[in-house]
Amino acid sequence: MLTGSCLCGKVAFTVEGPLPDLYQCHCSLCRKVTGSANNTATLVATSRFRWTRGEESIRSFVRDTGYRNDFCACCGSTVPNLMRSGETMWIPAGLLDEPVGAAVTKHLFVASKADWDEIGGTGQRFAGLPDRLP
Ligand SMILES: [Zn+2]
Ligand SMILES: [Zn+2]
């Protein structure tokens, strides 16, 4: 069982492992959300995800296009959110507290990455969005 939490600790959750492969999205929106080069995350079935505390502290921001960022109202950390299908939870990898035993296997929106973003590793690179995630 993996545990995850936000910066202040108010919001916490568990994910039943093993964790699927991770992806990194290098799009301009993910840069804004993270303040950094990319957003590293994965998707897990809702049945393997459980909030352990702090759901009431979560706020949501949704752009007209549907791009969504759920975050802790206290510390601003991005937190997991339910995908529109209702079947999977999106999990930001940086919230996980222990080593996860999963690797970054996909890089998304490489065509619009920041000019200072140097992608490393062996993950597959996609100019935009691949057909399937993770
Ligand atoms: Zn927090
Ligand atoms: Zn993105």
Image (cartoon, rainbow, N blue to C red):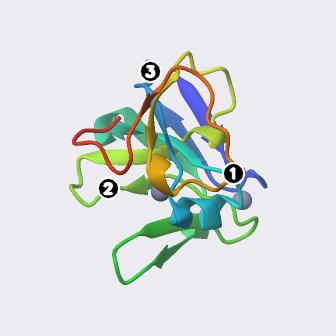
Which of discs 2 and 1 lies nearer the camera? The answer is 2
Note whether residue 88 is visible.
yes
Location of the C terminus (image quadrant): top left
Residue visible at 46% across and 52% down in the picture: 111
Residue visible at 53% across and 51% down in the picture: 26
The amino acid on which the numbered mark 2 sits, given as a three-letter code, is Met
Q: Is residue 107 above or below residue 99?
A: below
User: Horizontal and vertical percent for residue 121?
Assistant: 59, 22
Q: Secondary structure at mark 1?
A: loop
Which label was assigned to residue 53?
none
User: Horizontal and vertical percent for residue 97?
Assistant: 69, 31
Q: Which badge, 3 or 2, comes first in the chain's sequence?
A: 3
Q: Along the horizontal axis of the image, is 76 left or right of 125?
A: right
Mark 1: few, some, or many residues within 10 Å (few <14, many ≥20)?
A: many
Q: CA distance from mark 3 to mark 2?
A: 19 Å
Which label was assigned to residue 83?
2
Q: CA distance from mark 2 to mark 1?
A: 19 Å
Q: Which residue is mark 3?
A: 17
Mark 3: few, some, or many residues within 10 Å (few <14, many ≥20)?
A: few
Nearest the viewer among 65 and 120 is 120
Is the C-beta of the residue carrying label 1 under 8 Å from the nearest atom of ligand 1? yes
The amino acid on which the numbered mark 1 sits, given as a three-letter code, is Cys
Q: Along the horizontal axis of the image, is 26 left or right of 32?
A: left
Which of discs 3 and 2 lies nearer the camera? The answer is 2
